[in-house]
């Protein structure tokens, strides 16, 4: 009989835990309460760099047990190595639920693991609950956010990837006497075909990563030219945020495609999203409409962006933004 | 080199209308090739431009009328294609879809070197079908691919987009790649292409043709199922201002930033 909740404790390139792990940890506590306080555990990959710090964080976030795969060979994420270790662990401990952050890594690893184990996986969930029958009920947006679906799974573990920044992090620490267990594994049997060559960091317009930014200043075709985007950069810097763009602006080469927001770009959930000169086509708004607060500046009062905006300003970005920047500089 | 491109027919999300019961009105909904699959097709065609020996097959699983998107693919230069269709496939989740497509690729295309998928389909938006195909074919996979940099001696080198930048990876063929929106635009059909597409013979394969059992496909073969579908709460209309002067506008923005 499957038991307990397992969480993928994803770390970044420098071996720091990702925020989504703490969001999952918090939700797992709620789910566990509805499952006779079942065990909440994590699987952590590390090369040792930041292991002590990560152990400390995990024990403050309510994990009963942490399985650690520690090796220099695991420094760089490898789908073949990671999925092998995760699959073997799951076969061994048979969790009832396995949750993974819906990051680029999570959305590759999760379906590989699920298919290998012949179990079900719900993608990019925005809400998790336990239903009256004790099953994991995973809710997610479909049809570009037009429809929500709650999905159940017939097999074990019941798996879901969960969209970062949607669930809440733990407010106060839940300190547990966490058991840390280094797991052994044999990678020599893995026929590793994907080889990592190099990493090229983003040449973003701002210092803050767009998927982590609490404030995003996004521009569309209405920003007209590179000078227009300079204003957005300046504003983002003053607010400690990041610059995003519509596809319209990316197509005009005003911004790199890595910061495009929307259906064929990224989905972001910042605290504040400032849309400047963006019309608000559905393909754009599916990527940003879950933001906590949306401020829109557009000179066309009929622009659809005003339908999703919490605060809409009908006006000219070239009159408003320079003055706003001046005022913020004080 | 044999390339298989997986294409899906999706409703145009810009065009969604609602029935009185809050379900999506499917009649009259415009169908398109999933936008990411357009980039997968274009990426395959670029390889065909570069290497004369490339043969591209487009395939889709769906209702018989999904044939339309195979014709569209042929019109832009894909060599041939087929539709995987059977009432027994209905209700498939990504696990069953991946299994079915992989079986069809194995049975119906000889010696596939490269399978290209889109990263997401805009209706389901799961990004799980490509990985499920790769496990069923026992091929390695790279997802979030932005560009193919080179193909040499059976090794393909790609650029993958991740949250903090780009990774360069290489993989030995055969392999599955899932394509993001690329920095080039998908080509449009030529007049000749339309003619070829109209004449093309597009086979339809059902369960018997792909060597799976009824238990492995469709709703029966799917580990997940939808228990409930509902329309998200409509957001309350926000406050829209038409400020009389710039100061007024700035104050409203500062208020919103601080509040
Ligand atoms: C398959 C598909 C996928 C797509 N994916 C995406 C996606 O991922 N992301 C995305 O963003 N789009 C996407 N699009 C494109 C989308 O449909 C829109 O075309 C695009 O978002 C428009 O960009 P925009 O708002 O910058 O430009 P426009 O629609 O041209 O809007 C510019 C706006 O700026 C305003 N404006 C102009 N000057 C000023 C000024 N001085 N002051 C204030 N306001 C001003 C105008 O009133 C207008 O509303 C996709 C389209 C398709 C078909
Ligand atoms: N029914 C289908 N027929 C062909 N290809 C599909 C189908 N469903 C998904 N795919 C492929 O898998 C990709 C990801 O789809 P999804 O997992 O639904 O987000 C798509 O871009 C297609 O390349």
Image (cartoon, coloured by chain):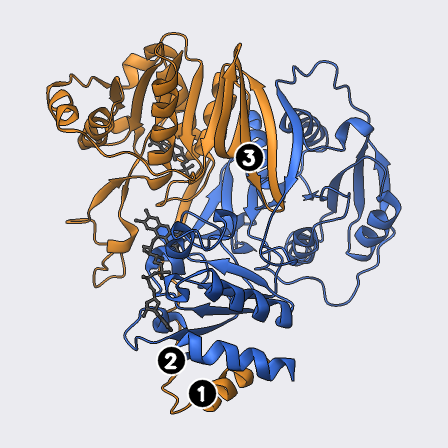
Chain colours: A blue, B orange
Q: Which residue does the numbered mark 1 point to in the structure image?
A: B246
Q: Which residue is located at x 82 percent, y 29 percent?
A: A72
Answer yes or no: disc 2 within 8 Å of ligand 1.
yes
Are labels 1 and 3 on one chain? yes
Which of the two residues, A291 or A23, is positioned nearer the viewer here? Answer: A291
Q: Secondary structure at mark 1?
A: helix
Q: Is the residue A280 above or below the residue B103 in the image?
A: below
A159 horizontally vs A14: left or right: left
Which of the two residues, B92 or A9, is positioned nearer the viewer here? Answer: A9
Q: CA distance from mark 1 to mark 3?
A: 43 Å
Q: Which residue does the numbered mark 2 point to in the structure image?
A: A315
A105 horizontally vs B246: left or right: right
Are labels 3 and 2 on one chain? no
Give yes or no for contact between labels 3 and 2 (Cβ–Cβ under 8 Å): no
Which of the two residues, A236 or A216, is positioned nearer the viewer here? Answer: A236
Q: Residues within 10 Å of mark 2 (few under 14, many from 20)?
A: many
Q: Which residue is located at x 80 percent, y 42 percent?
A: A66
Image coordinates of residue B47 in percent, x first then y, are 39, 21
Q: CA distance from mark 3 to mark 2?
A: 39 Å
Q: CA distance from mark 1 to mark 2?
A: 8 Å
Name the front one of labels 1 and 3: 1
| Disc ID at residue B160 | 3
Q: Which residue is located at x 64 percent, y 58 percent?
A: A208
């Amino acid at each position: 009989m499957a038991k307990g909740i397992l969480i993928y404790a994803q770390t970044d390139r420098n071996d720091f835990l990702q925020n989504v792990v703490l969001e999952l940890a918090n939700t797992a506590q709620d789910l566990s309460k509805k499952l006779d306080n079942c065990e909440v555990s994590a699987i952590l990959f590390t090369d040792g760099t930041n292991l002590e710090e990560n152990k400390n964080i995990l024990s403050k976030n309510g994990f009963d047990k942490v399985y650690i795969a520690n090796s220099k060979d695991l420094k760089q994420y490898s789908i073949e190595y990671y999925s092998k270790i995760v699959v073997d662990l799951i076969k061994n401990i048979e969790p009832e639920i396995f949750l993974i952050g819906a990051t680029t890594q999570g959305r590759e690893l999760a379906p590989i693991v699920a298919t290998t184990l012949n179990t079900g996986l719900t993608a990019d969930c925005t809400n998790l609950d336990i239903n009256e029958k004790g099953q994991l009920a995973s809710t997610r947006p479909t049809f570009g956010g037009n429809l929500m679906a709650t999905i159940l799974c017939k097999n074990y573990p019941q798996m879901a990837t969960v969209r970062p920044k949607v669930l809440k992090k733990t407010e106060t620490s839940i300190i547990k006497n966490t058991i840390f267990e280094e797991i052994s594994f044999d990678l020599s049997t893995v026929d590793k075909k994907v080889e990592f060559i190099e990493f090229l960091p983003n040449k973003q317009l701002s210092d803050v990563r767009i998927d982590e930014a609490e404030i995003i200043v996004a521009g569309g075709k209405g920003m007209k030219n590179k000078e227009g985007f300079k204003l957005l950069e300046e504003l983002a810097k003053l607010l400690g945020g990041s610059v995003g763009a519509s596809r319209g602006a990316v197509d005009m080469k005003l911004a790199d495609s890595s910061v495009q927001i929307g259906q064929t770009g990224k989905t972001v959930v910042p605290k504040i999203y400032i849309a400047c000169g963006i019309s608000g086509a559905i393909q754009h708004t599916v990527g940003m409409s879950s933001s906590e607060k949306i401020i829109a500046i557009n000179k066309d009062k009929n622009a659809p962006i005003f339908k999703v905006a919490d605060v809409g300003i009908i006006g000219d970005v070239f009159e408003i933004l320079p003055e706003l920047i001046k005022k913020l500089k004080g | 080199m044999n390339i298989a491109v997986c294409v899906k027919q999706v409703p145009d999300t810009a065009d969604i209308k609602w029935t009185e019961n809050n379900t999506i009105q499917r009649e009259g909904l415009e169908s398109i090739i999933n936008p990411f699959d357009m980039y997968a097709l274009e990426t395959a065609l670029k390889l065909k431009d570069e290497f004369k020996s490339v043969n591209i097959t487009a395939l889709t699983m769906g209702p018989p009328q999904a044939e339309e998107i195979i014709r569209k693919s042929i019109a832009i230069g894909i060599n041939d294609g087929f539709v995987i269709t059977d009432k027994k496939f209905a209700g498939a989740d990504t696990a069953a879809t991946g299994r079915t497509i992989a079986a069809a690729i194995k049975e119906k295309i000889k010696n596939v070197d490269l399978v290209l998928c889109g990263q997401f389909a805009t209706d389901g938006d799961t990004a799980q079908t490509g990985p499920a195909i790769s496990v069923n074919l026992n091929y390695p996979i790279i997802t979030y691919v932005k560009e193919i940099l080179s193909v040499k001696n059976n090794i393909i080198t790609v650029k993958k987009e991740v949250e903090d930048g780009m990774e360069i990876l290489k993989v030995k063929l055969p392999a599955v790649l899932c394509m993001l929106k690329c920095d080039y635009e998908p080509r449009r059909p030529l007049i000749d292409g339309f003619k070829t597409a109209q004449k093309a013979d597009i086979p339809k394969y059902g369960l018997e043709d792909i060597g799976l059992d009824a238990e492995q496909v469709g709703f029966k073969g799917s580990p997940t199922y939808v228990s409930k579908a509902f329309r998200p709460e409509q957001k309350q209309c926000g406050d829209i201002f038409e400020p009389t002067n710039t100061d007024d506008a700035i104050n409203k923005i500062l208020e919103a930033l601080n509040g």
